[in-house]
Amino acid sequence: MISRRPILECVPNFSEGRDPQKIQAIADAIRSVDGAHLLHIDSSPAANRTVMTFAGEPAAVCEAAFRAVKTAGELIDMTKQEGVHPRIGATDVCPLVPLYDLTMEEAVGLSRQLGERIGNELNIPVYLYEYSAVAEHRRALPDIRKGQYEKFAEKMNLPEWKPDYGPLELTLQSGATVLGARDVLVAFNISLKTNDINTATYIADRIRERGYYEKTEAGKVKIPGLLPKLRAIGWYMADFQSAQVSMNLLDYRVTSPLKVWEATSALAQTLGVEVIGCEVVGLIPETCLLEAGAFTWLREGKEPPHDRELLVHAAIEHLGLNKVKPFDPREKVLEYSLKRAGLS
């Protein structure tokens, strides 16, 4: 793709998935900034979480992110919030993703400016993560979020968990926010034909990079996971009335949705469980679908077609992307959404 100006993407996750008025107010805050293009909104009542994706020139995106964090902090009361998704704040995490003509170092600088402004002006504790992290133990989101909102006030008392910006004590209504520059991430959930959370957790433990601990006579032994650059947990998703393996693909070039689907399907089969289909939360790069689509031809010994639309629709069928909820590639593929917004 050719771009004539730097394009920054922001994918904030808000701890609200049930109140349409609050979700709309946050979306309106993003839309209120000229040059920030809201590409997609993905809400889950069971997770009680909404993921919004917007992009544009860096200054506009950072301003829109600030207004969204401000609105979420005013409308979402974390003392009353509950849902199956881990979280520590009204704006739980706010990643900045450099897409075109923008370096990761520049995105890190923008994240630190934005984090400082959120901490100072909104009185919200901010933790920098991923490429923006100032310490290795604060790089991974699960490590920062461990303990969740309910235990975070106590966690903040530890010297190693003081925030990078903002107050040193938890702001009870809005909680805390994790913010930083990262690569494109694919949020990919596979639904299983069972309600058993233990089955989903068993699979998640074995495919995620961090692996799991196994009890032996000598004590606990760490068993590495199957797939690098993959985080995964198991949960029951009431939205679809099934257990899910919920995953973040940190680098889809290393571990793609196709690899995750094949590994999960194989493990599920050993447990006598069927996979129903997949859910993409937010947007997905086109190349992920092209790879999965080409696989359907290659496994039959055929040369994949050059027609991208054929490959995309083959991927949708193979991965079951329309089995859990509707999947419209015009709305769910990152490049297509950017093109529709005039950003590529």
Image (cartoon, helix red, strand yellow):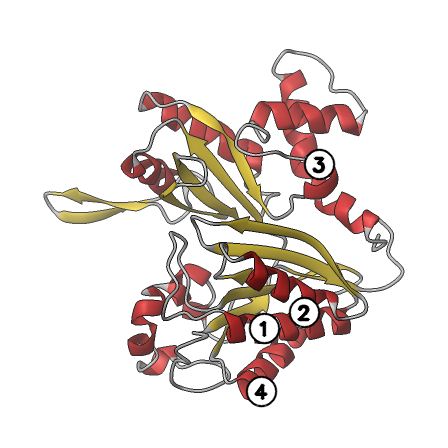
What amino acid is at disc 3? Pro
Residue 71, numbered circle: 1
In the rendered structure, find residue 232 and report the number of the disc placed on it.
Answer: none
Instruction: Estimate the x, y position of residue 199 in percent, counting from the top left.
Output: 31, 34
Look at 47% across and 35% down and name the residue there. Answer: 190
Q: CA distance from mark 3 to mark 4?
A: 39 Å
Residue mark closest to the camera, 4 vs 2: 2
x, y percent for residue 285: 68, 43
Going by the image, does 213 lie left or right of 281? left
Tell me the residue at 71%/29% (across/down).
Answer: 312
- Give the residue pinned by disc 3: 329
Earlier residue among tags 3 and 4: 4
Confirm or deny contact between disc 2 and disc 1 (CB under 8 A).
Answer: yes
Residue at coordinates 41% horizontally, 44% vertically from top-left?
208
Task: Classify mark 1: residues with Cα within 10 Å, few (<14), some (14-19) or many (20+).
Answer: many
Classify 10 Å Cα crowding around label 3: few (below 14), some (14-19), many (20 and above): many
What label does residue 29 carry, if any?
Answer: 2
- The amino acid marked with disc number 1 is Thr
Expressed as whole percent of the image width and height from the top left, the position of residue 188 reads 53, 42
Q: Amino acid at mark 4?
A: Glu
Give the secondary structure at mark 2.
Answer: helix
- Distance in Å between CA atoms under marks 4 and 1: 13 Å
